[in-house]
Amino acid sequence: MTSKCCVKDITGQTFGRLTALYPTKERHNEKIMWRCRCIEGNEIEVATADLIKGHTQSCGCLQRELVAQRVHRHGEAIHGNETSLYIVACEQRLSG
């Protein structure tokens, strides 16, 4: 178990979209977990190392945005707004 004297204080520091609020009493595989608030207002618990190394940068909102950008970039329909590339690709698949 890690003693309190060895806890690196990252309170108030920002990691991507997350701001470290306080260390929790929870441990995951003996790693200190921090309560963090995302810019969207959601709060999550993240291991110190995952914050510092950049493995966790948001509550999940960043991943959703990146996926939406990839889908749109490839011409997929978003909310019913099909791009011309998407329409041509669909027509080719159907006639194929």
Image (cartoon, rainbow, N blue to C red):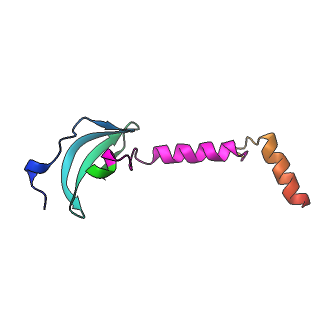
Q: Residue furthest right?
A: 95
Q: Residue furthest bottom?
A: 29
Rendered residue at 32%/46% (across/down): 51
Rendered residue at 44%/48% (across/down): 60
Can residue 95 be seen by looking at this rendering? Answer: yes
Q: Quadrant of the N terminus?
A: bottom left
The stretch of residues the image draws in magenta is 51-76
Rendered residue at 31%/45% (across/down): 52
Left or right: residue 22 versus residue 89 is: left
Q: Residue furthest front?
A: 53
Residue 54, position in %: x, y? 38, 46
Task: State the residue in front, 39 or 96.
Answer: 96
Residue 75, position in %: x, y? 73, 45
Q: Is residue 57 magenta?
A: yes
In the displayed structure, would residue 16 be above or below residue 31? Answer: above
Left or right: residue 32 versus residue 70 is: left
Residue 74, position in %: x, y? 70, 46
Number of numbered markers: 0
Left or right: residue 40 versus residue 14 is: right
In the displayed structure, would residue 95 be above or below residue 66? Answer: below
Can residue 79 be seen by looking at this rendering? Answer: no
Q: Is residue 2 magenta?
A: no
Q: Quadrant of the C terminus?
A: bottom right
Left or right: residue 36 versus residue 57 is: left
